[in-house]
Amino acid sequence: MFEYIFPIAAMLLSFMALLSSIRFIISKNGLFWILPAIISILLCFENLNTLLIVGEHGSEIFEMTFSNTIPVILSFLWYMMVIMFHYAMKLAIPENKYINDSKKNKAEAIYIEKYERRKNYVKRKNKEDDSSNKTRVPVVPSYRGKLVD
């Protein structure tokens, strides 16, 4: 059972690097992540091949040597490199302030438009109510026979 630890650890680390690369491809800086994703896929297939060979032949092929620990070390270093590359890109490539400001300005304009539309609707409604109240026939008091000086 001990012979499966290094191939499974190498496979797990390379698969985590692949998933991280795929996740970062979907982000706004996706073009930078195509090459790391390809390298992660190749590393994942290599570790899968090693795991399948150990699964077929068992402990008769696997010996505890430095050459069998190299895939684990390589996978670990590659995963750390992917993470470091992600943080380096976060620091090196600033966010696009123009796009963020445009989104904020659009949201503010939509809010102001709704507010103005509601205010004009209330003003129109009050004007219609006032005009409907003012359109009545004026009543003149009747003349009773005497003039008032």
Image (cartoon, rainbow, N blue to C red):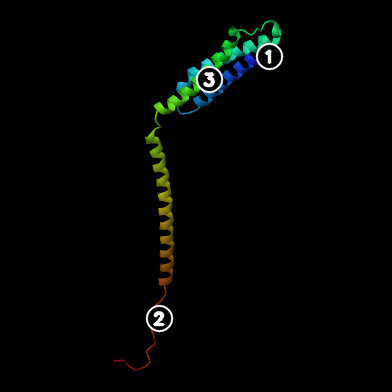
Q: Which SS class for mark 1?
A: helix
In depth, the one of 120 and 109 nearer the eye is: 109
Nearer the observer, disc 2 or disc 1?
Answer: 1
Disc 2 residue type (three-letter)? Val
In depth, the one of 144 and 31 nearer the eye is: 31
Q: Which SS class for mark 3?
A: helix
In depth, the one of 143 and 94 nearer the eye is: 94
- Other-residue count near label 3 (Cα within 10 Å), few / some / many at <14 / 14–19 / ≥20: many
Quadrant where the N terminus is found in the figure: top right
Tag 3–tag 1 contact (CB < 8 Å): no
The residue at the point 42 percent across, 47 percent down is 110
The vertical placement of 112 against 126, above or below, is above
Disc 3 residue type (three-letter)? Tyr
Give the residue number, with chain letter if any, for mark 3.
79
Nearer the observer, disc 3 or disc 2?
Answer: 3
Tally the numbered discs: 3
Label 3 – label 2 distance at C-alpha: 92 Å
Going from the N terminus, do you reach mark 2 or mark 1 first?
1
Q: Which SS class for mark 2?
A: loop
The image quarter containing residue 142 is bottom left
Give the residue number, with chain letter if any, for mark 1.
2
The vertical placement of 12 against 134, above or below, is above
In depth, the one of 116 and 47 nearer the eye is: 47
Disc 1 residue type (three-letter)? Phe
Going from the N terminus, do you reach mark 3 or mark 2 first?
3
- Other-residue count near label 1 (Cα within 10 Å), few / some / many at <14 / 14–19 / ≥20: few
- Other-residue count near label 2 (Cα within 10 Å), few / some / many at <14 / 14–19 / ≥20: few
Give the residue number, with chain letter if any, for mark 2.
139
Label 3 – label 1 distance at C-alpha: 23 Å
The residue at the point 43 percent across, 51 percent down is 114
The residue at the point 59 percent across, 11 percent down is 69
Q: Position of residue 52 (x, y in %)?
A: 66, 11
